[in-house]
Amino acid sequence: MDWFTAPEYWLSRLLFQRALAGVYLVAFLTAVLQFRALLGERGMLPVPRYVERVPFRAAPSLFQWRYSDRLFAGCAWAGCAVSAALLAGLDGLLPLWAGMLLWLVPWALYLSIVNVGQTWYSFGWESLLLETGFLAVFLGNDEVDPPVVVLFLVRWLLFRVEFGAGLIKMRGDACWRKLTCLYHHHETQPMPGPLSWFFHHLPRPLHQVEAAANHLTQLVVPFLLFAPQPVATAAASLMILTQLWLILSGNFAWLNWITVVLAVPALDLPTGHRRSAGPPLWYEVVVLAAAALIVLLSYHPVVNMVSRRQVMNRSFDPLHLVNTYGAFGSVSRIRYEVVVEGTRDDVPREDSDWREYEFKGKPGDPRRWPRQFAPCHLRLDWLMWFAALSPAYAGPWFGALVERLLEEDRDTLRLLRRSPFPPGEPPRYVRARLFRYRYTTWRELRETGACWDRTYVREYLPPTRLTATVQAP
């Protein structure tokens, strides 16, 4: 069936698959490096405790049948290995059916992690990676040309990512409609990057242009993805440029990178006269069946998008096959940070020798310039940003974090940039205080060398020791 495939998108498919494999690799490496402290048997939110109360049908996962830290590590490392193999192009050397099964492996492994990841894996880009990874299973390899229906579904996913984000902004915070949200966003975003200070100090008229361009890219351009070429290529290129701007201005894990990946199959790249053999009948049947399933499951995300009570980043099925997306429906005007400190004094007083724990990505020492971590996802640092917004976000895990610091837990300390205490000398007390952070001005930066100025607000958690169970703030 000539209508079934689009040989002119052969190179676009190749770039999409290799880039997606790279994102998978980052996601699995992040899991390898962080899971023990977050989800392990002695983690802050242990998987065994979670699967005891959540049935398989609600959260399908390999770990519903059995969990151990060694098994989790094995799955995560296996995901790294398969992702690296896909990045190297192993799927192109296999028969079509074997290549599809190879793409199914990282999707199944990452689904198993996300579905037991609890609040640490509650971000929209987890579902976005799974939905994208599921579509990649059906894109085929060198034996067949890219199927048109799957290319369309990839554009449909990109449309929902961008249009959903645009709608949630227009329906949410009034500053998006007034074009003033970016007066604050670069300063109050979850994890600023090395250039965020400079983005914040751009002239306000340029911030308004940024906001207007965002609305254009998210509310108008997505419809052009379904236009004939070269219009679709122009639309996808504009989306890629917008995502690169966001990559420069902050640390949003792999959200922006996977959005760039999704735009690649819409690009009409020169491929010469390459044409593969016709697709086998079984492949056509499988692809059309998968497409019908995706169309059917799109009902709830579409209803959500047109609803006045639109929600962001929600999965409507436990396999995360079709989801709803969106980000920054509201923008904070003030940045708060939770600063965690410890002391070895026997009696904690205000004038005790309190030493500050330093996190890798979130602001701490006002003189320490933010670093670039994306596409890596520092999950604890992100949740600390939410904890500063409201103690309710920290309820399930903050007490456990303090306990691990008091115990000098090795896996937890590895999540931090630096512990202020030498090995073998843990603190006797740990406390947390809430500070207001703001970017310094150009003059303050020249005079003090500090990119942040911080002001004490209130106590977040009183001095706490191990003699009693630590209560969350």
Image (cartoon, helix red, strand yellow):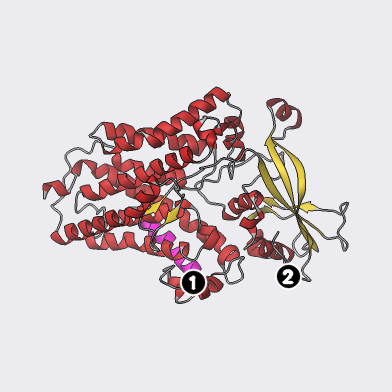
Q: Which residues are magenta?
A: 71-86
Q: Is residue 95 visible?
A: no
In the rendering, at what x and y percent does residue 68 appear?
52, 74
Name the amino acid type tagged 2.
Answer: Thr
Question: Which residue is label 2 attached to?
Answer: 469
Quadrant occupied by the C terminus: bottom right
Residue that extends furthest to the front in the rendered view of this protein: 308
The answer to which image quadrant residue 439 occupies is: top right
The image quarter in which residue 190 lies: top right
Residue 472 visible from this viewpoint: yes
CB atoms of marks 1 and 2 within 8 Å? no
Q: Is residue 82 magenta?
A: yes
Q: Judge from the rendering whether residue 63 lies leftward or rightward of residue 435; answer left or right.
A: left
Q: Residue 358 in the image: state x and y as whole percent.
A: 69, 50
| Mark earlier in primary sequence (1, 2) | 1
Q: Residue at x 49, y 71 (%)?
A: 54
Disc 1 residue crowd, few under 14, some 14–19, many 20+, Cα 10 Å? some
Find disc 1 in the rendering and name its residue: 54
* Element on which disc 1 rests: loop
Q: Main SS type for the magenta part?
A: helix
Q: Mark 1: which amino acid?
A: Val
Does 10 lie within the magenta span? no
Q: Quadrant of residue 110?
A: bottom left
Q: For numbered disc 2, what is the local secondary structure? A: loop
Q: Residue at x 36, y 52 (%)?
A: 132
Image coordinates for residue 12, horizontal then vertical, percent: 28, 42
Kindly identify the residue that appears in the image at 44 percent across and 76 percent down.
Answer: 65
Position in image of residue 372 (x %, y %)? 56, 42
Q: Between marks 1 and 2, how big is the CA–CA gap? A: 25 Å
